[in-house]
């Protein structure tokens, strides 16, 4: 029976990718250690053919510009807090990557942690859909999801997938991250898939983050970056205080509250 259910979920996943759809989620989250550091942001889950991409709507706009002009809208230097994933249909199960974009490279962090869902008989009405409850441990957090088989797509926000229907909402036990579906729409245009880039494991990504924390400009220096200049209030060219910039980036990293908290190496205690 378990094998039959697994095969059915795979078929649902394949079926979902034969449709061209977009699902808009609101993410309410706590990006830092401060008690009141709550933010809200809209993300788009774009499903088409054998791929789905989850990214914030500004990143989707940037990816569309890149597809037409080769130039995007820049990227956040707070790499650890980037929330973008790529799911690719593959046998016997989809490949899932956390997509990271820097000023110089794309990185695809392979998610190897198994998503072992525990389904509950509990149901409720959510956004007009009958939703069923499921629980999961991922990234050092305990998650509760609500999914609906009214939308037969075995996908959801971020890395989450594998339930017999679309995930309408998923929240961690500490209420630091909550993804909620707010809109569905048919996607008739190209949804501008992001290129995969350099594939690495999460352990390798953690090592990269440690190196990045020590020197946020190490990739630029590898490409021969020299002194950086800017203009002051009077229009004069002045040298940028790189040490001050580095300290600012390091402070942000120390305060980060990433989804995969179990992989975080740079903590506030390391100040």
Image (tube, helix red, strand yellow):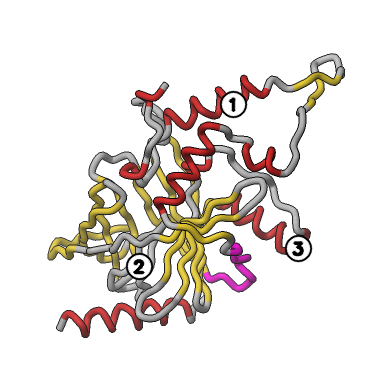
Disc 1: which residue: 246
> Where in the figure is residue 85, as x and y percent of width and height?
47, 58
Closer to the camera: disc 1 or disc 2?
A: 1
Q: Is residue 97 visible?
A: yes
| Crowd rating for badge 1 (residues with CA inside 10 Å; few <14, some 14–19, many 20+) | some
Taking the image as shown, residue 248 lies to the left or right of residue 154, namely: right
Q: Secondary structure at mark 2?
A: strand
Residue at 35% over, 67% down: 166
Question: How many numbered marks are there?
Answer: 3
In this rendering, the answer to whether 158 lies above or below 89 is: above
Residue at 45% over, 76% down: 89
> Where in the figure is residue 43, as x and y percent of width and height?
49, 53
Disc 3: which residue: 68
Query: In the rendered structure, which segment of residues is drawn in magenta?
Result: 186-195
Disc 2: which residue: 166
Q: Is residue 37 magenta?
A: no
Q: Secondary structure at mark 1?
A: helix
The residues bearing labels 1 and 2 have C-alpha atoms spaced at a distance of: 41 Å
Closer to the camera: disc 3 or disc 2?
A: 3
The residue nearer to you, when weighing 184 against 94, is 94
The residues bearing labels 3 and 2 have C-alpha atoms spaced at a distance of: 31 Å
Q: Is residue 192 magenta?
A: yes
Between disc 1 and disc 2, whose residue precedes?
Answer: 2
Taking the image as shown, residue 104 lies to the left or right of residue 1, namely: right
> Where in the figure is residue 116, as x and y percent of width and height?
23, 64
Residue at 49% over, 63% down: 86
In this rendering, the answer to whether 31 lies above or below 109 is: above
In this rendering, the answer to whether 123 lies above or below 28 is: below
């Amino acid at each position: 029976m378990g094998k039959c259910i697994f095969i059915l979920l795979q078929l649902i996943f394949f079926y979902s990718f034969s449709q061209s759809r977009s699902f808009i989620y609101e993410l309410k989250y706590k990006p830092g250690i401060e008690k009141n550091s709550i933010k809200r942001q809209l993300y788009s889950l774009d499903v088409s053919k054998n791929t789905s991409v989850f990214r914030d709507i500004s990143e989707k706009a940037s990816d569309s510009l890149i597809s037409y002009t080769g130039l995007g809208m820049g990227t956040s230097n707070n790499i650890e807090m980037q929330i973008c994933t790529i799911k690719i249909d593959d046998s016997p199960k989809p490949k899932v990557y956390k997509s990271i974009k820097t000023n110089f490279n794309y990185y695809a962090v392979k998610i190897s942690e198994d998503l072992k869902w525990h389904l509950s008989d509990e149901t409720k009405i959510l956004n007009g859909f009958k939703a069923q409850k499921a629980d999961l441990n991922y990234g050092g957090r305990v998650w509760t999801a609500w999914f609906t088989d009214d939308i037969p797509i075995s996908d959801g926000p971020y890395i989450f997938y594998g339930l017999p229907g679309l995930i309408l909402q998923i929240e961690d036990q500490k209420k630091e991250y909550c993804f909620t579906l707010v809109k569905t729409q048919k996607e008739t245009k190209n949804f501008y898939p992001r290129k995969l880039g350099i594939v690495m494991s999460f352990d390798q990504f953690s090592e990269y983050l440690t190196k990045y924390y020590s020197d946020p400009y190490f990739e630029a220096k590898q490409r021969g970056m020299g002194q950086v200049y800017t203009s002051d209030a009077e229009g004069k060219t002045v040298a940028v205080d790189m040490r001050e910039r580095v300290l600012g980036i390091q402070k942000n990293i120390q305060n980060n509250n990433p989804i995969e908290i179990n992989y975080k190496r740079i903590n506030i205690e390391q100040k």
